[in-house]
């Protein structure tokens, strides 16, 4: 989830290089709809990557709160270009499993995804 089209495109390319099939959304509202649709179709998302700050929509903090109501076992990575937010220092306190800073590097993104997918379901 990212509100910047260029960032979404970069993430899509990186995730496809890692062999993943991303669903791209602009904001938290779209993320919640897509998450529910995938779950209801029997093809739940393995994880979500949420941008912390979204202009004009639900950001990462609000979205993870709503996702956890739908699925307490959701695996989520928070992403941001701003390093001073307490969520980035203590992601688990806010329901996230990992942090990936922007700008994205494939090695950092790949490692975070591997770590999150290796976590046992709560």
Image (cartoon, rainbow, N blue to C red):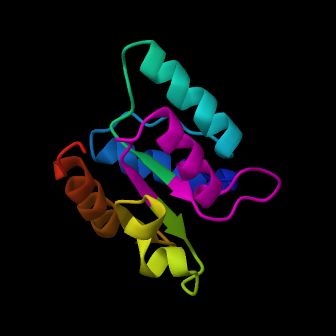
- Residue 24, placed above or below residue 60: above
Residue at 24% of width from left, 63% of height from top? Answer: 111
Which of the 4 image quadrants contains residue 90? bottom left
Tell me if 4 is positioned left or right of 110 in this view.
right
Where is residue 42 drawn, in percent x and y? 37, 14
How many numbered callouts?
0
Residue at 77% of width from left, 50% of height from top? Answer: 57
Tell me if 48 is positioned left or right of 116 in this view.
right
Where is residue 54 drawn, in percent x and y? 71, 59
Q: Quick one: which residue is furthest to the right in this view?
A: 56
Which of these two is toward me, 22 or 39?
39
- Residue 39, placed above or below residue 113: above
- Residue 102 visible here: yes
Indicate yes or no whether the magenta region holds residue 55: yes
Which of these two is toward me, 108 or 98?
98
Which of the 4 image quadrants contains residue 6? bottom right
Which of these two is toward me, 119 or 15?
119
Residue range highlighted in magenta: 50-77
Residue at 28% of width from left, 47% of height from top? Answer: 18
- Residue 99 visible here: no
Residue at 39% of width from left, 42% of height from top? Answer: 74
Which of the 4 image quadrants contains residue 82? bottom right
- Residue 96, placed above or below residue 1: below
Where is residue 88 drawn, in percent x and y? 48, 76
Q: Quick one: which residue is furthest to the bottom in this view?
A: 84
């Amino acid at each position: 989830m990212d509100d910047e089209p260029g960032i979404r495109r970069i993430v899509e390319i990186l995730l496809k290089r890692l062999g993943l099939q991303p669903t791209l959304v602009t904001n938290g509202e779209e993320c919640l709809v897509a998450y529910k649709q995938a779950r209801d179709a029997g093809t739940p998302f393995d994880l979500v990557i949420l941008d912390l700050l979204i202009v004009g929509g639900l950001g990462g903090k609000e979205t993870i709160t709503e996702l956890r109501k739908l699925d307490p076992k959701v695996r989520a990575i928070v992403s941001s270009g701003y390093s001073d937010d307490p969520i980035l220092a203590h992601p688990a306190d806010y329901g996230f499993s990992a942090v990936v800073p922007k700008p994205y590097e494939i090695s950092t993104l790949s490692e975070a995804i591997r770590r999150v997918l290796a976590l046992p379901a709560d």
